[in-house]
Amino acid sequence: MIMQREFTAGAKYCNQNRVKKTFFIETWGCQMNEEDSEKLSGMLKKMGYKKTENKIQADLIIFNTCCVRENAELKVYGHLGALKKLKEEKPGLIIALCGCMMQQKHMAENIIKKYPFVDIIFGTHNSYKFPQYLNAVHQNNSSVVEIQDRETGIVEGIPIDRESTIKAFVTIMYGCNNFCTYCIVPYVRGRERSRNPVNIENEIKNLVSKGYREITLLGQNVNSYGKDLLPRVGFSQLLRRINNINGLERIRFMTSHPKDLTEDVIDAVLECDKVCEQIHLPVQSGSTNILKKMNRNYSREQYLNLIHKIREKIPEAAITTDIMVGFPGESEEDFEETLKLAEEVKYDSAFTFIYSRREGTPADKLETQIPEDVKHERFNRLVEVVNKCSARRNRAYEGKIEEILVEGPSKNDSRKLTGRTRTGKLVNFQGDMDSIGKLVKVKITRANSFSLLGKQVQ
Ligand code: SAH
Ligand code: SF4
Ligand code: F3S
């Protein structure tokens, strides 16, 4: 049974600062980190801090780091180097580093040696203690480094300062048990822990009462939700419970693992009116041989069967994926199987990655590493195939009328509005500015590779 407890520290540190200090937060990585940053922000606002987008003027700078690939780490080093001068000019500035990269002890030690001007370092398991660390730095004028080796249950009730007022991410489970041989996530996020469904429901009801219309349920592998709960609650049961929440319009979820996506989940997507027809189903490779070496626990055929089942039951569903090239031992034939699979599935979109060696993972120890130039050449070929499929899938929307949840003015043209279809396609359209936060009907007039254009009709 997972220990679940209430967050208390926030209130203790409330309103300590008479003059409002400001904080700047930069987040790398996935939605897990985004959500952690929203919680850090929530705690800081409770403490009387104000958020700023101006890094130079901030009293506190936080970098929430990711280590899933080497380039994620290199970005952090680049940004950190640039802070040295700022800290010399502003000795009162506090610099805090957290997130997955810091959860690796050797990394945190390296940072302390190379960047001694960093004031606070903490990992993913103890971010709820951030108010304490900040207070200690203020009081003792010394730095704080605390990396907790293991996860300790779930802390509920941490205030969250969300970016959007219309759609929200809600974490339903933390950690991962899968240990894909290339992946660092299980080492830095710990084992799977599911949140109590009542806490999830209450959080969503509260969001709906504040005007939120769409929620995305988050977890590294949402299909194994509830396996650690007593009584057990399956993911499809959770979807059906959330579907009953009045006032909520749309439910999305990610990420699904092909080995655990069962038929009852596909049925729940089909039968629950609020659950959107969009499934993110990372394939990683189209070669059974490579999938085995990755410890993914499904074959090319099993994956394709699953896609077939989804398409049969929900023909309009958008299917998206993650694909990696250059895993150790990947031959030209293995790679061609990936290309063929991408063409066969006709993904709506795909995140494509070049395999990156991660210290401490089994794949890093393999002697069959692929040369960089081969990896890049394969990557370019894959991107071409994937983009062609996306463009084709998007073109099928031309002339159709789609339901859009309006999120706000378009980023590139503020006279236009932006929102998404139920299938998750981004649409920029001419429409009524009063529609923000509402569901409207939009006629799709043109399709680009990565977005759609349209005009509001209702
Ligand atoms: N839990 C999710 C996503 C985890 S990380 C899942 O299982 O699908 C997001 C993506 O990063 C992965 O799907 C994978 O494609 C990619 N990734 C993870 N480790 C990587 C590595 N070492 N090199 C390159 N890409 C990696
Ligand atoms: Fe990483 Fe695999 Fe877990 Fe996804 S399922 S987070 S790729 S170990
Ligand atoms: Fe990165 Fe951590 Fe997410 S390593 S991808 S931020 S879980």
Image (spheres, grey):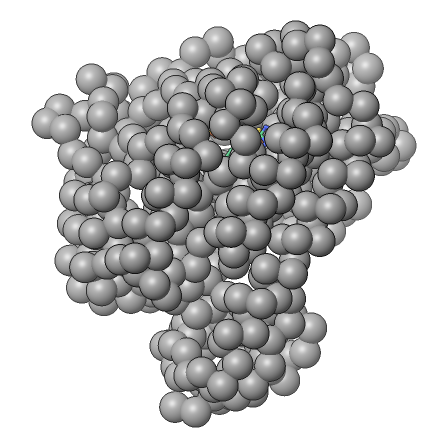
Q: Is residue 186 left or right of residue 26?
A: left
Q: Residue furthest front?
A: 333
In the image, what residue occupies the spot 35% across and 31% down? 259
Using the image as rendered, state which of residue 238 and residue 39 is in the foreground. 238
> Percent x, y for residue 275?
28, 58
| Residue nearest the observer in this picture, 181 or 232 | 181
Q: Position of residue 3 (x, y in %)?
A: 25, 19
Can see residue 254?
A: no
Of the 4 image quadrants, the one containing the N terminus is top left
Residue sitting at x 42%, y 83% = 401
Q: How many marks?
A: 0
Q: Is 395 positioned to the left or the right of 153 in the image?
A: right
Q: Residue furthest left?
A: 231
216 vs 433, left or right, is left
What is the quadrant of the C terminus in the image?
A: bottom left
Q: Looking at the image, is 159 positioned above or below residue 4? A: below
Quadrant for ligand 3 reads top right
**Observer-nearest residue: 231 or 213?**
231
Instruction: Determine if residue 292 is in view.
Output: yes
Q: Quadrant of residue 250?
A: bottom left
Q: Position of residue 134 (x, y in %)?
A: 57, 26
Q: Give the image location of residue 263, x and y in percent.
A: 23, 43
Q: Left or right: where does residue 299 sit relative to residue 184?
A: left
Query: Which residue corresponds to the image point at 56% horizontal and 74% vertical from the top-left?
Result: 395
